[in-house]
Structures are given as C-alpha cells and as structure tokens.
Amino acid sequence: MKMFRSIVGFAIAGMFVMSVWGAFAGAYGIAGGWFAGFIIISIMWFLNHFIGIIDNPGAFVDMAMGIAICGTLRPVFSAGSITPLIESLPTLIIVILGGMTGGIVAVMFQNDLAKKSEEVKEEA
C-alpha cells in the first residue's frame, strides 16, 4: 500500500503542476506563474510530506520526479505518438546532467563542511 500511496502522491503533484501552473502563468503572466508555483508546490509538499501520502524516507528525488514524468509523458499521450518524447530527449539529457552536477557539488560542499567541522573540533 505504501508504494501505491507514493505513486498516487507523485502523480497528483505532476498532474496538478502540469495542468494548473501553465494556466495561471498564461492568464496572469509572470506573477501568476510565481503564485501558482508557490501555491501548488506548497500544497503538494504539505500533502505528500507533512500528511505523509508518499513513503520516501531519506530520498533526494520525490515530487520532482513525478512532475518530470508527467511533464514528459503528457504530450506523448496527447499526441498519441512518441514524437514529443523523442524531441524532448536533448532537454532531458541536459536536465539530467545538471542534476548530476548539482549532486556532485552538494557532496563536495558537505565534505568540505565536515572537514572544517573536524578541524574546529581538533583545535578545541
């Protein structure tokens, strides 16, 4: 049941973002996009993490993965063809490389902070 609950939580986040965010941004411009982002992500984080719809302890990718899958596959189902998926591959590759770069830099920062913390403890 935990896996089903998590899939539902991820799917709701993806569908909510893909259907509402663009409509707000289209109707109200950049302010509508910011407002939609704040409201949608806040509500979905509350439901998924605080209420506990998803069971994802210690994971580093959660709602973003559901949103990414929904955003990638929604045009595929709308078009009834895999052409939109093939056309999105260069963007997906760049996004994955960016995520990997961010992860590597985050680990480097953590290691540096841990090293600095050990140096402070040794001096004391």
Image: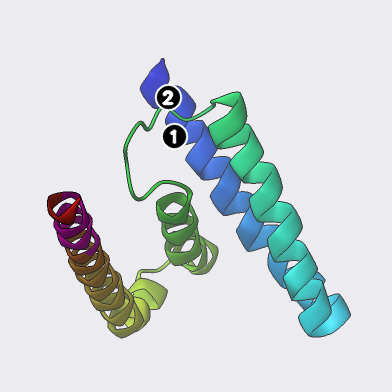
Q: State the scheme by which the image is colored.
A: rainbow
Q: Which residues are magenta?
A: 113-121
From the viewer's perspective, is 66 left or right of 37?
left
- Residue 86 visible at all: no
Q: Position of residue 78 (x, y in %)?
A: 54, 64
Give the residue at x 27% y 71%. Answer: 96
Measure how far apart labels 2 and 1 are at the Cα level: 5 Å
Judging from the image, what secondary structure is the residue with disc 2 in?
helix
Read off the residue under disc 1: 7
Give the residue at x 40% y 19%. Answer: 2
From the viewer's perspective, is 102 left or right of 118?
right
Q: Position of residue 18 (x, y in %)?
A: 62, 61
- Would residue 37 be counted in the magenta stretch? no
Asked if 121 appears above or below 55 in the picture, the reply is below
- Would residue 118 be counted in the magenta stretch? yes
Say which quarter of the image contains residue 104: bottom left
- Name the kind of residue labelled 1 in the image: Ile
- Name the kind of residue labelled 2 in the image: Phe
Read off the residue under disc 2: 4
Q: Position of residue 42 (x, y in %)?
A: 68, 49
